[in-house]
Amino acid sequence: MAGNAIRNDHSEVAELLASIVGAPNVSRTPRDLMAAGLPLGPGEVSDARAWLVRPGSAAEIAELVRLCGARGLTVTPIGTVSRKRSGTKTSQARVIIDLKRMTHVLHLDETSLVVHAQAGLVGLRLEELLLPRGLTIGDYPPAVLRSSLGGLVSVRTPGKSSPRHGFLADAVLGVTAVLPSGRTIHTRVAPRRASGPNLASALIGSEGTLGIVTAVVLRIHRRSEARLLAAFRFPSIDSAVASVTLALRADVRPSAVRVYDGAEGRVHLGSDASNAEEAIVTLCTSGPSELATVERDIYADLARGLGGTPLGSAPAEIWWRRRSGHTLPGPVPPPPALEIAAPPSRLVPVYQAVVNAARHAQRDARAHISRFDDDGACIFVTLLDGDRPDPAGPARSDVERAVRDAGGFLVGERDQELAPYFMALRKELDPSAILNPEVLDSSR
């Protein structure tokens, strides 16, 4: 077929792409394709029907998408590629659209506390630009902000939240995006009481399947005047979690808070931090000095009422420095094997189910709970065979089953009940399935 001949003609497609973005911004080198997340084995590069392009504007992206639609090429948008692709190989020819050239701040309104920036700008870089003006995106973990703005809004995960500033997705006031048809849309930025349906909500979390986000308008914040750290030891994980949920219910809004079980506390905070039955809470309150002090003191009163013992700021300093990306003496704790989301009432039952399921499989589990908000928190679990991390061992499937039975949710799993509705919307916007066809596809 003629279509297949066009798709296989590497030089012709490269010339068409170069006519849009310029020849220096088109690549088929193995290094670039693999860095973009394309799974290639030895000897596959020369046969790979894939091109990496680096557009410099939304208009170029729109033209690229229209070209791909006409030529039967699929489109994969990428930013920092901090989130690994599944590794599924496909015979479909594709164009990978790399947004790293699109890194400009388009407008900053210091009165309304709003910033408009291109989607290729990395969150940490935006933080650096806001810092001299006493501004910030919010109290989100620096590890989260290593993604591009496009990636931050296109992939919805529980980690992009803080008790003080809420979910990052809720800070999105508007987006510019290129739809599968090649049409560019700008969602309205207006006070919410003056807006109709918010089209940005459909694009947020859609992972580039409904449109390619090219720019974002974000609510930002004043940088905190004070930041106070505290730590408390509790007789059990139950009392530690209860202290945090009670504090949130009392409208205490810390920048961040974490609960360690006894084993996790010893690994992260020092061998004398706690025994096996105890738990540690580390807390950071921030804002104007008076507010940060009042919120810290309210939490301290709640903690003491539940048997909490103040430990001073030293353990919290260790936690905060590691959270901020600083290197500390000693071994680095291994990454967790599982990330679990649970509502407030199910945090402790899910944690206990994890520990019991691991024990039944003759393994150990330790955990910390963080990223609290009014909807719950995330439980980060490390599975162990003795002292050795065992993330893919025999306990994993039992633990995952126990999590579901106890009312928890494995982060990254899709709600299959909603899948038919999403696929119907996707088919309406992208009938030819050119945008990220391998992502969020319930049929695969």
Image: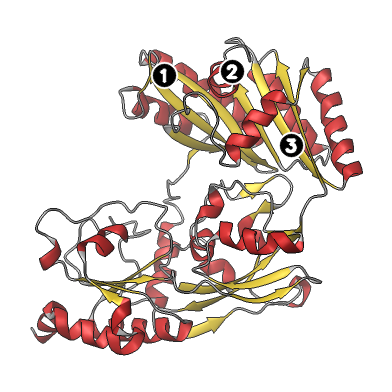
Q: Amino acid at mark 3?
A: Cys
Task: Using the image, determine if residue 121 lies above or below residue 352.
Answer: below
Identify residue type, mark 1.
Ala
Question: Crowdedness of circle 1 by 10 Å Cα count: few (<14), some, many (20+)?
Answer: many
Q: Name the N-terminal-most of marks 1 and 2.
A: 2
Of the pair 401 and 64, the residue shown nearer to us: 64
Name the residue tied to disc 1: 358
Between marks 3 and 1 in the image, the one whose residue lies nearer the viewer: 3
Observer-nearest residue: 272 or 95?
272
In the image, 116 versus 415, the foreground residue is 116
Name the amino acid type tagged 2.
Gly
Quick one: label 3, few (<14), some, or many (20+) residues within 10 Å?
A: many
Q: Nearer the viewer, mark 2 or mark 3?
A: 2
Considering only order in the chain, which callout, 3 or 2, is on the residue closer to the N terminus? 2
Number of residues whose C-alpha sits closer than 10 Å to that of mark 2, classed few (under 14), some (14–19) or many (20 or more): few
Secondary structure under the numbered disc 1 in the rendered image: helix
Q: Which residue is mark 2?
A: 270
Question: Relative to 345, does residue 188 appear above or below in the rendering?
Answer: below
Report the residue marked by disc 3.
284
Does the rendering let one see residue 229?
yes
Q: Are marks 1 and 2 in contact (CB under 8 Å)?
A: no
Residue 108, disc? none
Residue at point 87% right, 37% down?
A: 293
Residue at x 40% of width, y 61% of height: 420
Residue 272 versus residue 28 in the image, above or below: above
Task: Name the residue at 74% across, 47% down.
Answer: 164
